[in-house]
């Protein structure tokens, strides 16, 4: 009982913050966009279906630099509008997703991507939470392996005092 | 009561792991203390250490001529600004002082002088837009000081995009071989000039 509690403690302390950050990153990259892409489409002239499909695919993982918690697709900042136009024309020119991403990353850095590429600079970002989790598990295992301290039995005088306390 | 607990050795001693949450908490505090001090608007520029994009834009005052800027051979300070930008007015005295530095070429990049609300659908590169922007920027420079040897008109913001401009003002230092060595987003402050820009100017060959 005591050991499980300890383990839960350590897990909460070590694992949860890291995991939640990671999960946040993943969901913002994956879950947010559908609604917002519609908004973007309504503020700019309509796109051809093929372009629209590519746009939906790529715009959601691009981040607005001015208002940093919005995607490029949803932001109304002027720079975001310019960049949307630019991305659109790159799509229309038939550039691949990678080429478009490179266009933006070479100018604004990894920051524009909600889901940055996995490379040495971003290792900490991608794997940090898992390292923390492993450390937490290792710590928990160590604690579990240790024998539970056996409480010394109460002496007669203590037992008597406890009885008095309970009865008073 | 306290007396009787003290006599029991297994209760008296705290287990060794008891400090773990405290250390973790302090670690988090340290993380937050550092993280909250940092300015989220400061995005590291991928341009540092790369060749600067070649500026090719109409220069202000020479009626629509496009000049190919050649970076090589001179230290160049590129400052992205506009008359509607409050930070630009704030930092202008500093740019004026920098313009008196010997051997430093000052280039103004007038970024999107006319904003979308003003253009109201009009082409930012149309003749009337160019004229309006030119008049306004020149008047502003006359009032606040001619800090720039060359001033380029980037009405559609395309050049700014190549430099990775995401807000005004922004300042770039380009060395003699054409490589970007420094970027500052936001108004220049005496502190930034004193502790970053000037030492860098002195250290560059």
Image: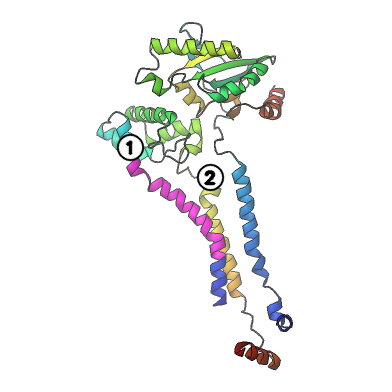
Span colored in magenta? A10-38
Residue A57 falls left or right of residue B174: left
Q: Which mark is residue A39?
A: 1
**Is A37 included in the stretch rendered in magenta?**
yes
Chain identity of mark 2: A
> Residue B155 lies in what quarter of the image?
top left
**Residue B195 percent coordinates (x, y):** 70, 30
Q: Which residue is mark 2?
A: A122
Q: Residues within 10 Å of mark 1 (few under 14, many from 20)?
A: some
Mark 1 or 2: in front is: 1
**Residue B10 percent coordinates (x, y):** 69, 80
**Residue A15 percent coordinates (x, y):** 53, 60
Single out the residue that lies furthest toward the front. Answer: A168
Please report the residue visible at 60 percent of the width from the left and 45 percent of the height from the top: B35
The main secondary structure of the magenta stretch is helix
Single out the residue that lies furthest toward the left. Answer: A49
């Amino acid at each position: 009982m005591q050991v499980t509690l300890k383990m839960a403690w350590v897990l909460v302390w070590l694992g949860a913050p890291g995991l939640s950050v990671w999960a946040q990153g993943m969901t913002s990259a994956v879950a947010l966009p559908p609604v917002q892409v519609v908004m973007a489409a309504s503020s700019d002239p309509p796109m051809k279906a093929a372009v629209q499909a590519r746009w939906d695919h790529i715009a959601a993982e691009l981040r607005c630099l001015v208002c940093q918690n919005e995607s490029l697709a949803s932001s109304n900042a002027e720079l975001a509008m310019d960049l949307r136009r630019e991305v659109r024309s790159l799509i229309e020119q038939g550039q691949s997703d990678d080429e478009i991403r490179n266009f933006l990353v070479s100018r604004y850095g990894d920051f524009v991507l909600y889901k940055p590429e996995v490379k040495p600079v971003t290792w900490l970002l991608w794997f940090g939470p898992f390292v923390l989790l492993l450390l937490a598990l290792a710590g928990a295992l160590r604690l579990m392996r240790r024998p539970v301290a056996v409480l010394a039995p109460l002496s007669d005088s203590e037992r008597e005092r406890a009885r008095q306390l309970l009865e008073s | 009561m306290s007396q009787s607990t003290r006599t029991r050795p297994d209760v008296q001693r705290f287990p060794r792991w008891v400090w773990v949450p405290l250390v973790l908490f302090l670690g988090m505090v340290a993380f937050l203390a550092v993280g909250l001090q940092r300015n989220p608007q400061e995005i590291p520029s991928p341009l540092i250490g790369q060749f600067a994009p070649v500026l090719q834009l109409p220069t202000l005052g020479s009626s629509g001529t496009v000049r190919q800027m050649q970076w090589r051979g001179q230290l160049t300070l590129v400052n992205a600004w506009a008359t509607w930008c409050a930070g630009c007015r704030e930092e202008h005295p500093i740019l004026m002082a920098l313009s008196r530095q010997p051997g430093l070429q000052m280039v103004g990049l007038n970024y999107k002088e006319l904003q979308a609300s003003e253009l109201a659908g009009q082409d930012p590169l149309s003749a009337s837009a160019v004229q309006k922007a030119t008049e306004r920027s020149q008047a502003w420079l006359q009032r606040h000081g001619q800090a720039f040897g060359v001033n380029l008109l980037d009405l559609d913001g395309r050049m700014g995009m190549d430099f990775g401009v995401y807000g005004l003002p922004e300042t770039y230092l380009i060395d003699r071989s054409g490589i970007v060595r420094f970027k500052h987003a936001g108004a220049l402050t005496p502190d930034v000039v004193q502790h970053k820009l000037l030492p860098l100017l002195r250290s560059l060959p």
